[in-house]
Image: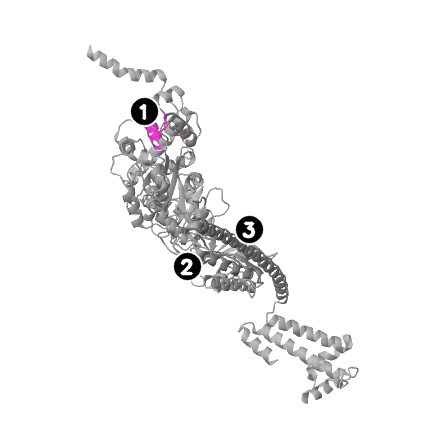
Amino acid sequence: MLVFTIFMIAENEKKVTSKVFVFFLFFLMINIVLATYQISNGNINPTDKMSDILSKGYELGTRDIGGGAFGTLFAVPAVRAIGAIGTSILCFGIMLIIIIIAFKINVVGDVIEFKENLSEHRARNKELAMQNEKKTQKLIKEQKVKEDSARQITSMSNEEVNNGPKKSKGIFSVFTKYYDDNDVAGIKKESAIMKNIATSTDVDYGDSLVQDDGDFEDEININLPLSKNSDGGSEQLEIPNMKTNTGRKTINKFDNNVEKNNKVSEDVSPESLGLNDSTLNVAEDHYEFPPINILADIGENEDGDIRKRILATSEKLRKTLQSFGVSAKVENVSVGPVITRFEIAPAEGVRVSKISNLADDIALSLEAESIRIEAPIPGKHTVGIEIPRKNKSIVGLKDIIESDEFEEAKSKLAFALGKDVAGDAVVTDIAKMPHVLIAGSTGSGKSVCINTLITSIIYKAKPSEVKLLMIDPKVVELSVYNGIPHLLIPVVTDPKKAAGALAWAVQEMVSRYSKFAEKKVRDIKGYNQQAEERGEPTMPQMVIIIDELADLMMVAAKEVEDAICRLAQMARAAGMHLVIATQRPSVDVITGIIKANIPSRIAFAVSSQVDSRTILDSAGAEKLLGKGDMLFFPIGASKPTRVQGAFVSDSEVENIVKYIKTDEINENSTSILEKIDNIDNPVNNVSDDEDDDNDPLLEEAIEEVIRNQTASTSFIQRKFKVGYARAGRIIDQMEQRGIVSGFQGSKPRDVLMSKERWNELKNAPSAENSASDE
């Protein structure tokens, strides 16, 4: 009773009334039980008068016997109704319920957990037995192979001794030449050891994730980053913080001797000269791909015993969810360069939204700076809880460029994006996007992402295959790429000229479609295929990169938006792709029209959920960590994918540019610049049109209006393919000359001049001139 009282006082300072009631009820049950005991012993007769019964109960209470008058008052009616035994059972049941509620004991949860642990323990024992059997069979097979190799080597060595040197063929000639008797003895000794291991029932799994004495850790599948053997062998499980030199090859006796014999040939190999296959293949284009060693090697950060910490965090996460009434278990853990994702399998009947609403509580329990919950993970029955790592690693671009995903990518527009939450390389294709919008706050990693994109193209495509058009209103971000052979023109830094460059891109797109129509093909792929068959030059793909869209929208919003929309709607088949970046993801910069026509998005860290919805149409980007942490939402995906972007430093970019930079004057670049300067777009011609008294198209427009007896701004736009502003000025000039009536609201303007009168006015000056000549 004393322990219960102390717990009730210390549990919670609030809810005093409810605690007093619970204490009173518990105290009453004890008194009733004691009074019932006195009734069953005959000290109190329940058939007497109630006054006599209470007097007897009070008398016993003064001697510290029974439940006193208070307990006797409630015990007597209960004993009369259900008997002494029934009264005792009822009181003990009520006290048990009070204890369960007061001490917050989850009886049902504990029973379910015990049942689950029992079934999992049985399954674990069964799986462990199967693994032991497989391990034993594998060791027996390896031992048999070792013995066969030893017998063959021994027989060949004896034959060498008896018959003298003999010219042999095949791989065993190497063993005959370089293995001695000590090697054979060593192999025999190793075979004996393997035999002992195979016959032993105690199989040592080393650092395996399945252990005999494990409990909670056996339930979790931990996916640590895998690193390939340097000799191209199978992958092994390695802790990501262990620094390994993947370029170092394990040398044994066989490798040493072969290396000596092949020393001359290796000295003149393409690798020793800093060349690769691509360098040799593009000699006819006078373009050498930059060597991969220009990019820096970035190792993993030391992260201590990561496996132990993962298991501890998993247990804490499970208990945290259980404390909020969510029954779930950790099924899988994926360790990435920056975050660790715990895959939680909720019990049947648990709402996914209930887990999502606990984000702040989970972050508090795990002491995490921020967490992101993906509920559910697409294609799985689990919920992903992404927690930042204590020691974050930098993803080097070199690791992605050297990955199989990038090397095996057939597209010339392969983009080495970074690594996902499992540490796997993410390589996407710009041609399949086909346009991408990149947005995020300052310092989140946008410019590095663009540098990564450009560098990926430099390492993947020749200048004759991919051309770049860069627009950089900030001046300092992309100017370093001036001089690379992939550039169509020098980086455009003037916002007014940028609008002209986009207008030129629209004309180039229309020109390409005209060529497609002449060749009767549908896209650039079919055009280039025909060109290769006929021996004609192919048409390069084009990537248009805009580093800061907000500056362009401030100078020439309508013209830029129109050009971007036309390119986004039609340029894919022409092999032209847009990459647009901005640090201000507001609706006046990323308008609804732009969003509707650019399907793929990359969102970096933003300050608010509103900005995240502007970019992705969903929340999530406000939970990112910055420094390359992104949400990649390609076209066709149901949910964005979290990726840690690859990092390339400014010095690496400068070294790459120095390697491929050329001083040759590009004639095409000069002609394109002239076209951009002379292009007819409203931004460059507004002042000229205002200075002219008459628009050059005014006379033709008057003839069309009089001929069709229709006058409106949309009619002029449709007939002469001009902008709305210019068409409006032409209509105003017609009104000043009395050709059409004034503005009449929603009604169309009236044509006030007949065709005959117009012809008279046109011929009048020529008649006067002829008369004066006579």
Residue 262: image location, x then y, percent: 36, 46
Q: Identify residue for label 1.
A: 698
Q: Disc 3 residue type?
A: Lys
Quadrant in which the C terminus is drawn: top left
Q: Identify residue for label 3.
A: 380
* Foreground disc of the pair 3, 2: 2
Local SS, label 1: helix
Residue at the far bottom in the pictured view: 63
Mark 1 closeness class: few <14, some 14–19, many ≥20 residues within 10 Å: some
* Foreground disc of the pair 2, 1: 2
Residue at the far left in the pictured view: 773
Please name whichever residue, 64 or 315, is drawn nearer the observer in this view of the structure. Answer: 315
Left or right: residue 31 versus residue 667 is: right
Residue 69: image location, x then y, percent: 70, 84
Disc sitting over residue 242 in the figure: 2
Tell me: residue 460, above or below residue 328: above
Q: Disc 2 residue type?
A: Met
Q: CA distance from mark 3 to mark 2?
A: 31 Å
Q: Could you tell me if the residues under marks 2 and 1 are in contact, i.e. CB atoms within 8 Å?
A: no
* Foreground disc of the pair 1, 3: 3
Mark 2 closeness class: few <14, some 14–19, many ≥20 residues within 10 Å: few
Quadrant in which the N terminus is drawn: bottom right
Local SS, label 2: loop
Q: Which residues make up the magenta segment?
A: 720-744
Q: Is residue 519 magenta?
A: no
